[in-house]
Amino acid sequence: MATAACDKDEAPTAASPKASVAAPSASGVPLTQAPGNELTGFEVAPGKFAIPVGPRLLLEPGKGAGPVRFGATVETIERQMGMKCQDLSPTFCGITTAAIDFVLTDGKVSEIRVHRIQRPSTPDRKGGPRVYGVFNGKLVKDLSMGMFRGLVSDALGKPLRVDTITEPNDFGTYEIAHYQGMSLEFDRLKNGNNVLGGVVLRPFDTPLPPVATRPLSTPPVIPPAAAPSASK
C-alpha cells in the first residue's frame, strides 16, 4: 500500500502505455527537445521514440558498468563503449547519447553516473539545451532506469541512508537512497510519478558521500565553444 502511494498510483502492466519502462520503437530520432515536457517512456516527440545507444551494460555496485570497470582509462572507456567521450576533461568523460558519464581521478574511472531519458545534460557546443538519451542496460536485480520508486525499493531492500533533496534542481530529484557501492536518485516527473532517475556507482571501499541537498549526478558546467574570431 505504502509503495503505491509514494509512486502516485499502482504500477501498470508492461502492455500499458504508462508502463514503468516503455519499450523503445524502431523510429529513433535525435534527442533535441528541451527538458520539462510531458511525454512518456522513450517518447521524445509525439509518435517519435528514442532508441538505446551503445553496448548493453550491467550496472554493478562496487565494480562498474559492463566491461568498463573502476580504474579504466579514457582509452578503455571509448574502446568498450564504441564511441568517443562527447564531453571530455581531465576529470570527466560524458556520453550524453548513451546516458552515461564517467568521473575520472588521476585519469582513471572513480565514479559512474547513469541517467534516465530526457534528464538535462550539458549544453551543446552552441550553448543550447541537450538531454540524455536512452541508457542501454540494467541495474542488478533486473532494474531499469525510469522504473517506479516502489518497485526499486522492494527489490533492493532498506538502504543504508536516505537523503531528502531540498534544493530545486533540473532533474526533479527529491530523494537519494544510498547502498554499498551505489546511490540511487529518484525523480518526480511532471505527471507526479516517482521514478529511478539516476544511478551513481562507486567502488566498495569508497565511503558514503556526505548528506546531499542536490543530485549527485549533476554534470559539470562546460562552457560553450568560443566563436571563431573574425579575420581582418
Image: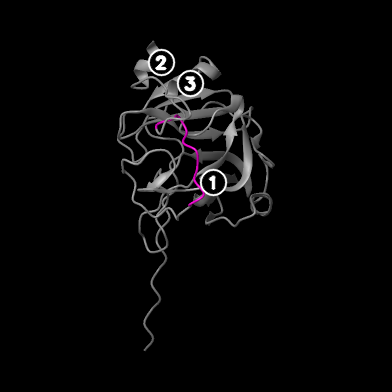
- Report the residue marked by disc 1: 52
Q: Residue at x 46, y 36 (%)?
A: 22
Dot 3 or dot 1: first in sequence order is 1
- Report the residue marked by disc 2: 3
Q: Is residue 204 above or below residue 134?
A: above
Q: Are marks 3 and 2 in contact (CB under 8 Å)?
A: yes
> From which residue to which does the magenta span run?
18-27
Dot 2 or dot 1: first in sequence order is 2
Q: Is residue 86 above or below residue 64?
A: below
Which image quarter is the N terminus in? top left
- Report the residue marked by disc 3: 151
Question: Residue 199's spot in the image, x, y percent?
Answer: 51, 33
Q: Residue at x 41, y 23 (%)?
A: 163
Left or right of residue 224, residue 53 in this image:
right
Q: Amino acid at mark 3?
A: Leu
Left or right of residue 193, residue 24 in this image:
right
Quick one: label 2, few (<14), some, or many (20+) residues within 10 Å?
some
